[in-house]
Image (spheres, coloured by chain):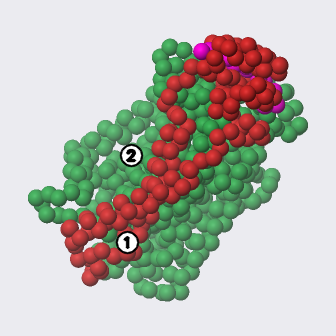
């Protein structure tokens, strides 16, 4: 099991390398791509773009809202203070806390989803510091020995620096 | 499309992180010394008692609450402006956003200290916390001060995350360039970032969601700060216009703070190729719009009070306009309205220098505005027995000045350890126009020792 990758100077070359890997039967989930910036103008930049993040943020917001309502209700009913004859649990003043915790819930849910979905905090064998200088890495991690030559040929068909780990 | 000058962007923006000059130590010493001096002053206030400050009946809110409102206002520079520019996908925002977001976080931290500084006995701050105790004194959960707690903490948490998330890819760049201990630290901060399409997509989606969430939170924060005043039966405070008036003022002072910070960064870190005149001109136009909006709110507030002709309100009205506070009031009007109108309204003056002068004026003017909202009203309430004066004492003045030193110190330290301009966002921007490209090519290379901190 080895990792083979190519370093390409621009998105067009990286896209060609990805297409050639697909042509030799490498599935999208097995292709590793690293870049130092979002590559939205290329097809490979949209791999894995489906996400539930928006819905999870809404869910986090609802959780925050429920927590705010619960906190307001419990604290105000447990320690009631009469302020100018206003109701002990009144909607108007509690709307503010409800709003703030709703937004906080949505923000925290978004960040947690990002960490989990983007697999942050997990190490990866395949990486090259040249990516930070603007190179685009396209490779296959854990390629079986039998297919190594095929993958190397596919990556090498596009001008770029080919490396094996 | 890969940015043509990817390596140069790295070199220019990472230079302050890897090279340290005497200037950095000098700045840290000067501003750190000022902050330390203010800390000693605060300790002396705690030791000798609150009597060493000028805060006494009936004016219980003075410089400290002025600073609190002012710095919370300045915090609107960053996250709000950055979030709006992100949502509308304004291309020119890219070099500006991080400079702005940093201001938010630090200004909030400084502002949030003042409720504690304002306590005569800060070690009893826990008395404010809502927990069951033998004293049987429960906080009023419907108080605007409780709203402050939730709003400011939500905004601070959101702003910190809003600042941190787009820094992750830049931490990865520093990780790849660094060695030794520095490499280990940035490896931890980069959270294993590789730059896969999935990571980029999730990051950008997260930033979009957070931008949508943080805008109403930012607006709510200063509205709620305004509620600290407008919920109280004090002349010229109980006004329905206070919410938007405070928010407009906050954005106004925030833009001014951002312009000053950008000009300093441009000058001392040699970022002329990144923070270009167009950024100052665009923000200068925003400053002009906010100056007009501020004038509109002041006009509304003043006219309605004048027409109402309520005696206690009119007393405060005239105090500020033609009696003891008149010099401060008219300085505020000149700084917040006349100066930006002239300097930002006339294209000839809308230069970087013009922006900085106008912004300095606005910062002074907005601080005076906060002071003039608080002190004249508290010193002249409804009945003569509650009339009084406020004279700030050295401890308050020192702490007020030190907040600016603290802001500068935090900014300098941040610029030393984190790229102050988002590297990946800059790389992802469209290539510069032909004329700008030519200027970039002709730009004088930065000599050894220049542009570092």
CA separation in Å, label 1 and label 2: 33 Å
In this structure image, what is the colour of chain A? red
Name the subunit of mark 1.
Answer: A
Instruction: Please identify the quarter of the rendering in which residue B176 is found.
Output: top right
Name the subunit of mark 2.
Answer: B
Q: Position of residue B327 (x, y in %)?
A: 52, 64
User: Does residue A112 show up magenta in the picture?
Assistant: no
Instruction: Please identify the quarter of the rendering in which residue B177 is found.
Output: top right
Disc sitting over residue B399 in the figure: 2
Front residue of B339/A19: it is A19
Front residue of B358/B155: it is B155
Q: Quadrant of the N terminus of chain A?
A: top right
In this structure image, what is the colour of chain B? green
Q: Which residue is mark 1?
A: A93
Q: Is residue B85 left or right of residue B22?
A: right
Q: Note whether B113 is above or below A58 in the view shown.
A: above
> The residue tagged with tag 2: helix, strand or loop?
helix
| Circle 1 or circle 2, nearest the eye | 1
User: Does residue A11 show up magenta in the picture?
Assistant: yes
């Amino acid at each position: 099991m080895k990792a083979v990758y190519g370093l390409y100077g621009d998105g067009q070359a990286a896209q060609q390398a990805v297409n050639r890997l697909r042509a030799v039967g490498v599935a999208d989930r097995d292709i590793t791509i690293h870049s130092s910036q979002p590559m939205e103008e290329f097809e490979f930049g949209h791999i894995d773009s489906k996400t539930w993040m928006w819905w999870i943020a809404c869910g986090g917001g609802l959780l925050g809202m429920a927590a705010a309502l619960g906190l307001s209700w419990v604290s105000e009913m447990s320690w009631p203070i009469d302020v100018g004859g206003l109701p002990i649990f009144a909607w108007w003043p509690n709307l503010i806390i409800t709003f703030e915790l709703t937004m906080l819930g949505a923000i925290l849910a978004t960040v947690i989803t990002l960490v989990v979905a983007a697999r942050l905090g997990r190490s990866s064998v395949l990486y090259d510091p040249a990516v930070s200088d603007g190179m685009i890495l396209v490779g296959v991690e854990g390629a079986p020995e039998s297919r190594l030559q095929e993958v190397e040929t596919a990556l090498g068909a596009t001008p770029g620096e080919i490396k094996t780990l | 499309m890969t940015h043509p000058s990817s390596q140069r962007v790295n070199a220019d923006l990472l230079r302050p992180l890897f090279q340290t000059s005497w200037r950095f130590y000098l700045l840290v010493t000067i501003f750190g010394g000022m902050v330390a001096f203010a800390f000693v002053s605060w300790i002396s206030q705690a030791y000798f008692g609150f009597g060493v400050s000028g805060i006494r009946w009936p004016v219980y809110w003075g410089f400290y609450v002025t600073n609190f409102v002012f710095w919370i206002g300045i915090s609107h520079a960053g996250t709000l402006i950055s979030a709006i520019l992100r949502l509308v996908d304004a291309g020119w925002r890219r070099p500006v956003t991080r400079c702005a977001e940093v201001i938010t976080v630090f200004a909030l931290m400084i502002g949030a200290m003042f409720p504690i500084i304002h306590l005569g006995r800060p070690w009893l701050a826990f008395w404010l916390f809502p927990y069951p105790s033998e004293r049987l004194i429960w906080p009023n959960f419907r108080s605007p001060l409780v709203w402050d707690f939730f709003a400011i903490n939500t905004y601070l948490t959101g702003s910190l995350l809003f600042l941190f998330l787009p820094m992750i890819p830049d931490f990865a760049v520093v990780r790849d360039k660094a060695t030794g201990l520095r490499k280990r630290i940035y490896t931890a901060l980069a959270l294993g970032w590789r730059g896969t399409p999935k990571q980029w997509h999730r990051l950008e989606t997260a930033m979009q969601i957070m931008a949508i969430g943080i805008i109403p939170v930012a607006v709510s924060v200063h509205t709620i700060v305004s509620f600290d005043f407008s919920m109280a039966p004090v002349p010229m405070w109980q006004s329905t216009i206070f919410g938007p008036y405070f928010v407009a003022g906050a954005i106004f002072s925030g833009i001014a703070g951002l312009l000053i910070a950008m000009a300093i960064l441009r000058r001392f870190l040699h970022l002329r190729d990144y923070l270009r005149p167009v950024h100052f001109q665009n923000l200068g136009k925003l400053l002009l719009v906010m100056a007009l909006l501020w004038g509109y709110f002041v006009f509304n507030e003043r006219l309605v009070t004048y027409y109402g002709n309520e005696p206690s309100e009119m007393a405060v009205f005239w105090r500020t306009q033609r009696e003891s506070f008149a010099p401060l009031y008219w300085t505020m009007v000149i700084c917040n309205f006349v100066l930006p109108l002239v300097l930002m309204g006339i294209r000839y003056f809308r230069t970087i220098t013009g922006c900085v002068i106008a912004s300095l004026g606005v910062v002074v003017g907005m601080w005076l505005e906060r002071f003039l909202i608080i002190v004249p009203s508290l010193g002249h309430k409804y009945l003569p027995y509650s009339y009084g004066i406020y004279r700030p004492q050295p401890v308050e003045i020192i702490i007020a000045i030190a907040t600016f030193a603290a802001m500068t110190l935090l900014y300098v330290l941040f610029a030393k350890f984190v790229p102050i301009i988002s590297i990946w966002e800059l790389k992802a921007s469209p290539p510069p126009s032909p004329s700008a490209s030519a200027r970039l090519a002709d730009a004088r290379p930065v000599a050894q020792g220049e542009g570092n901190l």
